[in-house]
Amino acid sequence: STEKANYDSFVTALRQGYVQLQSVNDDTVTQWAYNVALTRFQEVWSPQRAKLIAPMADMLNHSAEPNCEITFDDMGNCEVTAMYDIQPGTPLTISYGDPTNPTPIFAQFGFLPADCATLFCKAMHLEPYIKELGIEFRELLIQTETGEIAPKVWDLFLYEILVNNDPGAAEAYFVAVKCNDEATKQQYQDQYFQYTLDSMKQHVYSILSDVDTLTAKAQNYDLNTHPRVPVIVAHNNLVRDTFTMTAALLEQMG
C-alpha cells in the first residue's frame, strides 16, 4: 500500500542518519515518530514545497469551522492567527482538510470528525469523467443525515452512461454541464432517468457490500496490534448508514 511504502521510506531515511534518533532500531519508537510526522505536519508551497512541524501549533485540533489558521513565512517561522475574536477558554482549532468529506481526514489523522454533514459519493471508478467534466470532489456529496444525493453526482453518472452508449448525446450533455445549461441537462436527465437510476443503485449497493466486507474483516483483528479498529468501524458505519438512506431514496424513485 502507499502508506506501507511511505513508512518504509521513512525508516530507510532514519537509518541513513538524516535524523538523529537514538532508538532508530526500536520499531515502537520508529512507528511513533512516523505517526507524529504523518499527522502533525503543515504543508507549505513557498518558497518551495515542504512539510513543516511547529511545536505547540501542531497541537491545535480540527474543526469544520476553525477559529485559527497557520502560516509560515519564507524563513520557516510559524504564525498562528485568530480568524476572529475568540472568547477566553475557547479551544483553538484549525482545519485538517475539506470538511465536506471526512474520509481523507480519517485516513491521515486517524479520527472521525463528529461534525461531518456529508460524504464523498465514493465514485472513484468514474474519476476520468470527473476530470473531464471539471467537477470538484466536494461537489460529489451525499448528505449524512438524509442520504440525499448532490445534483453533480447525477450529472456524473448520466455522463458515464452517455459516453458508453451515445457519444453524440454525451458531447451535447458535456457542453450543457460546462455551460450550466439546466434546460438541456434536464431534457437528457428525463430521457435517461431510469438508466441513471439503475446505475446509481448498482453503485450504492456495491459500496454497501464492500463496507460490510471491510467491517467484518476489521472486527477480526486483534485490538492490541490494530488499535484503530474501533475508529475504522465507526467510519464504515457512517458510510453504511448514509448509503443505506441513499438506497432507500433511490428505491422510492422507481
Image (tube, rainbow, N blue to C red):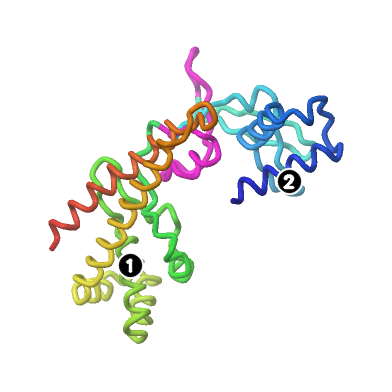
Among the 4 quarters of the image, the one containing residue 216: top left
Classified by dominant secondary structure, the portion drawn in magenta counts as loop
Residue 229 is situated, as x and y percent measured from the top left of the image, at 45, 33
The residue lying at 35 percent from left, 86 percent from top is 168
In space, the residues marked 2 and 1 are separated at their CA atoms by 38 Å
Q: Which residue is mark 1?
A: 157
User: What mark, if any, has residue 121 been given in the picture?
Assistant: none
Q: Residue furthest bottom?
A: 168
Classify 159 as above or below 169: above
Q: Amino acid at mark 2?
A: Ser
Between discs 2 and 1, the one toward the N terminus: 2
Classify 92 as above or below 44: above
Residue 156 is situated, as x and y percent measured from the top left of the image, at 36, 66
Q: Is residue 74 left or right of residue 187?
A: right
Q: Are marks 2 and 1 in contact (CB under 8 Å)?
A: no
Among the 4 quarters of the image, the one containing residue 238: top left
Q: Tag 1, which secondary structure? A: helix
Q: Which residues are magenta?
A: 85-113
Classify 142 as above or below 37: below
Q: Is residue 154 left or right of residue 226?
A: left
Q: Amino acid at mark 1?
A: Phe
The image quadrant where one finds the C terminus is bottom left
Question: Which of the pair 208/57 is nearer the observer?
Answer: 208
Classify 227 as above or below 163: above
Residue 203 is situated, as x and y percent measured from the top left of the image, at 31, 60
Q: Which residue is mark 2?
A: 9
Q: Tag 2, which secondary structure? A: helix
Among the 4 quarters of the image, the one containing residue 11: top right
Residue 250 is situated, as x and y percent measured from the top left of the image, at 19, 57
